[in-house]
Image (tube, helix red, strand yellow):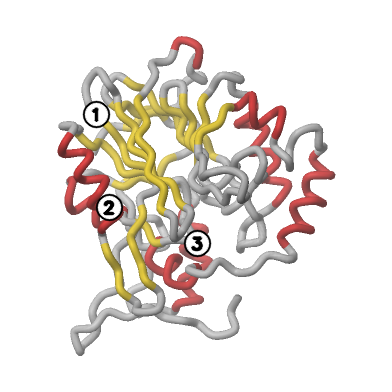
Amino acid sequence: MPAVSSKDPKPNINSAPKPEVLSFFDEPTHTVSHIVVDPETLSAVIIDPVLDFDQASARTGTKSADALIEIVKNQGLRIEWILETHIHADHMTAGHYLKEQLKAPIGVGRSISTVQKTFNPVFNQPYPAPEDGRSFDCLFTDGEKFRIGSLEATVMATPGHTPACVSFLIGDCVFVGDTLFMPDYGTARCDFPGGDAGTLYDSIQKLLSLPDETRMFLCHDYPPVEREAAWETTIGEQRKNNVHIANRSRSAFVELRTGRDSGLNVPQLILPSLQVNIQAGELPHAEDNGVQYLKIPLNQF
């Protein structure tokens, strides 16, 4: 496993190398996965990969993940990490599949244990996810650093959407998961267990303390009809134009976010996604008849 160093001062974005970012939009789940490449060494990481899932037939697929693998092989990339910004409730992760195919470790924020402890009782699996995060290969803490070839990456804890959300600052880019969306769409919901609108506001301010020119890459986009899907913005654009954040105090944001969350529907794939994603993407074990099952707990959400 690549070594992770102890905490160091925040890197200087202005002098940071510029990684190449290859992004892939999964239209069924509105999810964006990223391959982040060090052009000097061809070392790379994959962030927030998607496992295909057809809910009606309960069939999984690897077409989206295989497209990432094809790019990796065609460009001669060496995948150092598979990184999860959080435990997703809107799609299954392909992390485990890619780990097997590319022999790369999976990293996630250390507070994953909080999420596991919350949802293990809901699904009551006979083989629950270990609640110390052992399903993942590395549990990152706030401020930890690691290298991707010549690039330096820094982990930023950005909870609020979930307790385990982290952002990855890599060179002059920051990958923020669900914490922020495009400026015309706003911010993440905070009504999942362990979510908190005030905490999200504080995490966003932490991100906005980065230099304006920092490139920001998102995990989702839900575009209005007048534009196509997009997933790259900047810190400066978010600070000036984000419809939930710009010129809004913490208390006003909490009021806005809490009010919006009260009217939101539960994500369509939350039940299959959570029980797979807290296991780092490993599908449930086959039962004595050789069939794998996902559980659907009734009246829990």
Kind of element beneath mark 3:
loop
Q: Which residue is mark 1?
A: 43
As displayed, is residue 130 above or below residue 228? below
Query: Given the image, on which type of amino acid does mark 3 rest?
Result: Ala
* Contact, mark 2 vs mark 1 (Cβ under 8 Å): no
Q: CA distance from mark 3 to mark 1?
A: 29 Å
Kind of element beneath mark 2:
helix
Residue at 68%, 45% in the rendered image: 199
The image position of residue 216, as x and y in percent, is 52, 31
Kind of element beneath mark 1:
strand
As displayed, is residue 232 above or below residue 226? above
Taking the image as shown, residue 1 lies to the left or right of residue 22, namely left
Q: How many marks?
A: 3
Mark 2, mark 1: which one is toward the viewer? 2
Query: Given the image, on which type of amino acid does mark 2 rest?
Result: Ala
Q: CA distance from mark 3 to mark 2?
A: 18 Å
As displayed, is residue 242 above or below residue 254? above
Can you say which quadrant of the picture contains the N terminus? top left
Q: Earlier in the sequence, mark 3 or mark 1?
A: 1
Which residue, as the protein is rendered here, is positioned at the far top? 15
Taking the image as shown, residue 241 lies to the left or right of residue 127, namely right
Q: CA distance from mark 2 to mark 1?
A: 18 Å
Q: Which residue is mark 3?
A: 89
Quarter-of-image position of residue 246: top right
Residue at 39%, 55% in the rendered image: 133
